[in-house]
Image (tube, helix red, strand yellow):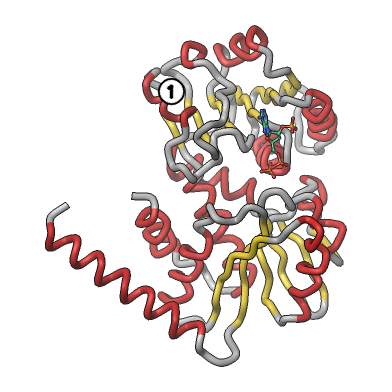
Amino acid sequence: MKVGEQTINKQTSFKKQRDYRSLAWRKRTQLVGVFGCPIGHTASPLMHNAAFLHLNLNYLYLAFEIKPEYLESAVKSVIALNFKGVNVTIPYKTEVIKYLDEVTPEAELVGSVNTIVVEGKKLVGYTTDGRGFLTSLINDAYENPQGKKILILGAGGAARALTMTLAQEGIKELIIANRTEEKAEALVSKLKNLKKLSPYQKIKAISLKEETLSRAILETDILINATSVGMKEEDPLLIKQEWLHPDLLVCDLIYNPPQTSLLKLAQEQGAKTLNGLGMLLYQGALSFELWTGIKAPLEVMREALYDKNE
Ligand code: ATR
């Protein structure tokens, strides 16, 4: 980067900081935010506040680190403090449901909520993760899941949201591999009850054991990491490099770091890769639209996210 460019970038970021400050001092600002623990990694405030500024909307998005014992009171405060709504992230997407007045049929099916909207005096839970991932798969990786064999690592909230969406998109096979096998099996049973499923679509659970997993990956078109493994540098690898092949698309829902160890291995093995930034963008755009009723400025939000991750 040239010195001149650096100066311009610095000036832009100072200007942005000034803008955020002036936004915080406005009167009757509509509040939104995200509840999670830990929350230091989140890029959502950057993306949403950039969108609010761009559209000159008097909204502010804040990140809250909520300790488990305070989740209930934090959720109740959403109405008390007159928020428009909040996002919910790790590890509360499932637990939060018991504190809501209503959830959409989709969120109920998935058993996960990533967006709360205040509707009158009610807290209503939505899930936008599955549609966010699907849009990123199509728009960013140019991949249509129809007719594909998909292997997903994980059976937590994120995995549930994705598998419910993908299973209804005409995929050929869905394999769920999870450390706690009973959780993968429970998810498979739930997916098999979906009305939209045809008898020709195969869905099964497997373990993370080397032999089983490596064999399954050989036959896979799209491999998705929906576990939290890879967020920390010292995390173990669930996959060995030699199990991967060039015909694979390897997706990691993690966006911080933008290139996880898994994605590095996949690239070295000649596979296509997709990180979690696209999913973050599209799920966030859907949340934005639920809170504001206004179409999200996708390009502004994308620029804010990718700026941070350059
Ligand atoms: P999220 O809402 O992001 O999906 P979650 O519901 O807590 O978060 O799910 C985390 C997922 O990562 C789970 O599938 C978890 O496996 P278990 O069901 O066995 O707990 C998986 N996971 C977390 N740490 C892991 C590790 N060290 N090895 C393997 N899987 C791990």
> Where 300 falls versus 153 (above or below)?
below
Answer left or right for 157 relative to 258: right
Q: Residue at x 51, y 89 (%)?
A: 26
**Which structural element holds mark 1?**
helix
Residue that numbered label 1 is attached to: 265
Which amino acid, by three-letter code, is at mark 1?
A: Leu
Image spot of residue 194 (x, y percent) = 81, 37
**Closer-to-camera residue (42/171):** 42
Q: Residue at x 44, y 62 (%)?
A: 301
Q: Quadrant of residue 266?
A: top left
**Closer-to-camera residue (87/179):** 179
Answer left or right for 277 relative to 292: left
Image spot of residue 257 (x, y percent) = 46, 42
Classify the position of ligand 1 by quadrant: top left, top right, bottom left or bottom right.
top right
Q: Residue at x 79, y 58 (%)?
A: 104
Image spot of residue 162 (x, y percent) = 66, 40
> Where 136 falls versus 14 (above or below)?
above
Image spot of residue 123 (x, y percent) = 79, 70
> Where 101 falls versus 254 (above or below)?
below
Answer left or right for 195 relative to 168: right
* Total marks placed: 1
Indicate if the residue with disc 1 has its beta carbon within 8 Å of ligand 1. no
Q: Residue at x 65, y 32 (%)?
A: 170
Check disc 1: other Cα within 10 Å, few if <14, some if 14-19, many if 20+: some
> Where 213 falls versus 61 (above or below)?
above
